[in-house]
């Protein structure tokens, strides 16, 4: 086992942050590492990784905690409801990080949760600072705060150059969700 785990951040306005984290999970399951992915925003919609993640069990566990995307047209939840759920996601994250059961924990869209003021940057920094030394921690979502970038070991910014949505092409099953 490696001596020190990494804190990895995938951020930026381009597509591929969750996909990159799932790539780590796919690779790590090949080495029988134990991975837990906690999704902070997604949850009310059906998307491909909900089903495909089951194929990676028992090494990979995915927990969708969020109530769906915040503030979009069909969002029927109050901001307070989203905040309660995000706090629950922090509690679950803390529990999973300190359980001793995982080599890698992925906090999907946690940076969005901070940007939407559902949780504080201090909540995120506490998770990073308290993680076991040997654990790898992956954080995704646009708007990664400078404080998070500063303490991370690896930060990749996804930059959109061209996107099919700009040409009226809607999200595609298996590619976007």
Image (tube, grey):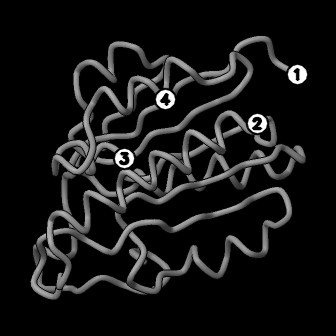
Q: Residues within 10 Å of mark 2 (few under 14, many from 20)?
A: many
Element under disc 4? helix
Tell me the element at label 1: loop
Q: Which residue is mark 2?
A: 103
Q: Position of residue 76 (x, y in %)?
A: 17, 85
N-terminal label among 2 and 4: 2
Picture quadrant of residue 100: top right
- Residue 33 lies, in percent from the top left, at 83, 43
Q: Quadrant of the N terminus?
A: top right
Is 137 situated above or below 59? above
SS under mark 2: loop
Q: Quick one: label 2 or label 1, which is nearer the N terminus?
A: 1
Nearer to us in this view, 152 or 68:
68
Instruction: Say whether disc 3 or disc 4 marks the residue closer to the N-terminus.
Output: 3
Circle 3 Cα neighbour tier, 10 Å, few/some/many (<14 / 14–19 / ≥20): many
**Labelled pair 2, 1 in contact (Cβ < 8 Å):** yes
Residue located beneath label 1 in the image: 1
Q: Which residue is mark 3?
A: 110
Q: CA distance from mark 2 to mark 4?
A: 15 Å
Q: Relative to residue 54, is residue 91 depicted above or below?
A: above
Choose mark 2 or mark 4, whichever is in front. 4
The answer to whether marks 3 and 2 mark residues whose Cβ atoms lie closer than 8 Å is no
**Residue 127: mark in rendering:** 4
Left or right: where 150 falls relative to 3? left
- Marks 4 and 3: in contact by CB < 8 Å? no
**Residue 158 x, y percent position in the rendering:** 31, 43
Q: Residue at x 88, y 44 (%)?
A: 31
Quarter of the image containing the C terminus? bottom left
Residue 124 location, quadrant: top left
Q: Going 31% across and 26% down the picture, which residue do you hit?
A: 122
Gap in angstroms between the C-alphas marked 3 and 4: 11 Å
């Amino acid at each position: 086992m490696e001596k020190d785990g990494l804190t990895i951040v995938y951020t930026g306005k381009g597509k591929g942050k969750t996909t990159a984290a799932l790539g780590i999970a796919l690779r790590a399951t090949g080495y029988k590492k134990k991975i837990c992915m906690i999704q902070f925003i997604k949850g009310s919609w059906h998307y491909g990784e909900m089903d495909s993640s089951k194929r990676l069990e028992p090494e990979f566990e995915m927990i969708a905690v969020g109530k769906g995307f915040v503030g979009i047209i069909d969002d029927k939840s109050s901001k307070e409801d989203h905040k309660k759920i995000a706090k629950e996601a922090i509690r679950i994250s803390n529990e999973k990080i300190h359980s001793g059961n995982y080599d890698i924990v992925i906090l999907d869209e946690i940076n969005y949760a901070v940007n939407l003021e559902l949780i504080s940057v201090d909540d995120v920094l506490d998770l990073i600072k308290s993680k076991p030394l040997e654990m790898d921690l992956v954080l995704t979502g646009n708007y990664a705060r400078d404080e998070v970038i500063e303490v991370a070991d690896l930060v990749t910014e996804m930059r959109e150059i061209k996107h099919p949505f700009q040409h009226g092409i809607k999200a595609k099953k298996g590619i976007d969700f």
